[in-house]
Amino acid sequence: MEEQRWDARARRAGGLVRPVRVDVDGRDGPTRQQARGPRWRQTSRGMYVPAEVDGSEVEQRILEQGSRIGRHGAVTAWAGLRWRGATYFDGRSGAELLPVPLVVGTGLLRSDPRVAVSFEQVGAHERELLDGVWITTAERALFDQVRRRHHLEQAIIDIEMAVAAGIVSADGFRAYVATRNAWTGVARARESASAAGLGCRSPQEVRMVLCWMWAAGLPQPLCNVPVFDRSGRLLAIVDLLDVEAGCVGEYQGEHHKSWERHRADVARREDLRAVGLEMFEVVGGDLAETGLVVKRMHAARERSAYLGEAERRWTLEKPDWWEPWAAAHGWL
């Protein structure tokens, strides 16, 4: 059976430590003298955690900076999405730790390099207390994330990954954006929301599908759909499927390099081709060479059979066993 290859949901790290204030008695926090010593680490003005607490852990960073929020504001953008469990939003740009984004409205908050503070308005209906941290609603967090993206592709990836994590729906986010007139960056949010809803489950899948549509000029495919033979056996859950042509596209990431995975991939390709589906593959690094990938896509589509539904030896019709199995394995 097909296994999920990239989990869009992240379990929040355990053992998170909430910052505490200086305590003159040293019971609920460090004394002033202790706070200046090596056993405590300052997280923000007047707030401390024990020095051994890992300040690079993404959820710990969110907790530390989110603890600064009081009567006004919330954690937002990538940090709000991660606190809700979206794997992709890890708070890094390469090796760099990104500042935790906070929106405070009319509230007062001293900025420092650990946070990115926005004084844009945030209504009471747009924030909630989740596991001890004030965060914006999922739609507002995603809106704050994508409207400041410089590149459309990256904004679409943000939306796809939030959808894959089950935090928002593409339609729900489009409806939210439609209410956000005259906000900074709303044009980017509208453009990316209109293009999203592809059904991808990893960032590289999004890049491959956008290459198929934008660079190769081919029709929008189905993504992450289960393909069965006529007896109801699952052949594969394919990354990209052009139903008209009978053409499949697969992104092969790092996890495909193991011997066990390679054997499974070979069997998978044989099963798909045995029922008349043509294939192309994209591996790590290929997407930097757009012309090469486009040529590969067009060649695979030209080799495809273009059979009508009645002639195909494969089907998208789901057998009775599919729904309970898919739900149990995280594919719904």
Image (cartoon, helix red, strand yellow):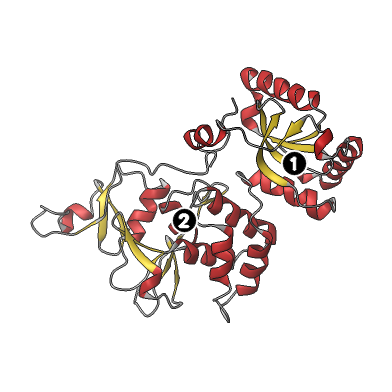
Place of residue 51 in the rendered image (x, y in percent of width and height, measured from the top left): 28, 46
Q: Is residue 302 above or below residue 49?
A: above
Q: Residues within 10 Å of mark 2 (few under 14, many from 20)?
A: many
Q: Is residue 78 above or below residue 318?
A: below
Residue nearer the viewer, 11 or 289: 11
Residue nearer the viewer, 98 or 316: 316
Name the residue: 45% across, 57% down: 79
Place of residue 86 in the rendered image (x, y in percent of width and height, measured from the top left): 48, 49
Place of residue 67 in the rendered image (x, y in percent of width and height, measured from the top left): 30, 60
Q: Is residue 18 above or below residue 300?
A: below
Q: Is residue 91 left or right of residue 153?
A: left
Q: Is residue 41 left or right of residue 59?
A: left
Q: In whole angstroms, how far apart are the C-alphas of marks 1 and 2?
A: 29 Å
Going from N to C along the chain, the mark reached first, 1 or 2, is 2
Where does the N terminus fall, quadrant-wise?
top right
Which residue is identified by label 1?
241
Residue nearer the viewer, 64 or 141: 141
Place of residue 187 in the rendered image (x, y in percent of width and height, measured from the top left): 65, 73
Name the residue: 21% across, 54% down: 35
Residue type (three-letter) at the residue carrying disc 2: Leu
Name the residue: 36% across, 59% down: 65
Question: Which numbered dot is residue 81?
Answer: 2
Residue nearer the viewer, 287 or 9: 9
